[in-house]
Amino acid sequence: MAISEKDHQLLWNYIDQDCSEAEQEQVQKRAESGEPWHEELQQKLLLHEVMQSIEPRHTSMRFVKSIMENLPDFNAKVVIPPLIPKDWIRNFIAASILFITALMVVSWGNAPMSSSGQTLQTVSSQLMSQFESIPLKQWTQFASLLFGILTLLALDRFLKHWKMNF
């Protein structure tokens, strides 16, 4: 009488002690009663002992490859986005230049005309009077904004340098 695949699985579960007590009793009774079961159980026990005594000499190449694939790439260049987008910086610089240019144009237009034309001294004095006419609150706000942007730019460069060397 041949042993079925299900019975082979039951024998391996018995050897691995991975079956219930009822299944253990069933295997023991069948091994005691029938020659094919006893012989199959003895072969599997012997094979199990041999396999337990053999130490693996080296790991498979696929094992090493799968481990290496799952490791992060430590040499990859880290892309860190800037704290302040470049468009914001360009817009701020453009607005500052536009503001200063507008003050200069207004000063040039408000300077009194002399017979020989406007001198640099009259234009500069008019420009200074335009700057002096701006309230202190607006200068404070502008200085705070400028300080904040410069601080963020410096922090951005420092963090990029620190992250690349870390």
Image (spheres, rainbow, N blue to C red):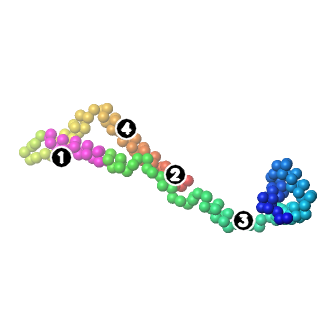
Q: Residue 144 carries which label?
A: 4
Query: Which type of secondary structure does the marked residue at label 3 adopt?
Result: loop
Q: Are marks 4 and 2 in contact (CB under 8 Å)?
A: no
Give the mark toward the camera: 3 or 4.
3
Q: Which comes sooner in the sequence, label 1 or label 2?
A: 1
Residue 33 in the image, given as x and y percentages of width and height? 92, 58
Q: How crowded is mark 1: few (under 14 residues within 10 Å), some or many (20 or more)?
A: few
Q: Which residue corresponds to mark 1?
A: 120
Q: Residue at horizontal 26%, vertical 43%?
A: 99
Q: Which residue lies furthest to the front in this view?
A: 1
Q: Which residue corresponds to mark 2?
A: 162
Give the mark toward the camera: 1 or 2.
2
Quadrant location of the N terminus in the rendered image: bottom right
Q: What residue type is labelled 1?
A: Leu
Q: Which comes sooner in the sequence, label 2 or label 3?
A: 3
Q: Which comes sooner in the sequence, label 4 or label 1?
A: 1
Q: Do the residues labelled 1 and 2 touch (CB within 8 Å)?
A: no
Q: Which comes sooner in the sequence, label 4 or label 2?
A: 4
Q: Can residue 116 be seen in this view?
A: yes
- Any magenta on residue 103? yes
Q: In this view, does 101 lie to the left or right of 49?
A: left
Q: What stretch is highlighted in magenta?
A: 93-111
Q: Can residue 16 be seen in this view?
A: no
Q: Which residue corresponds to mark 3?
A: 59
Q: Which amino acid does label 3 sit on?
A: Thr
Q: Nearer the viewer, residue 88 or 102?
A: 88
Q: What residue type is labelled 2?
A: Trp
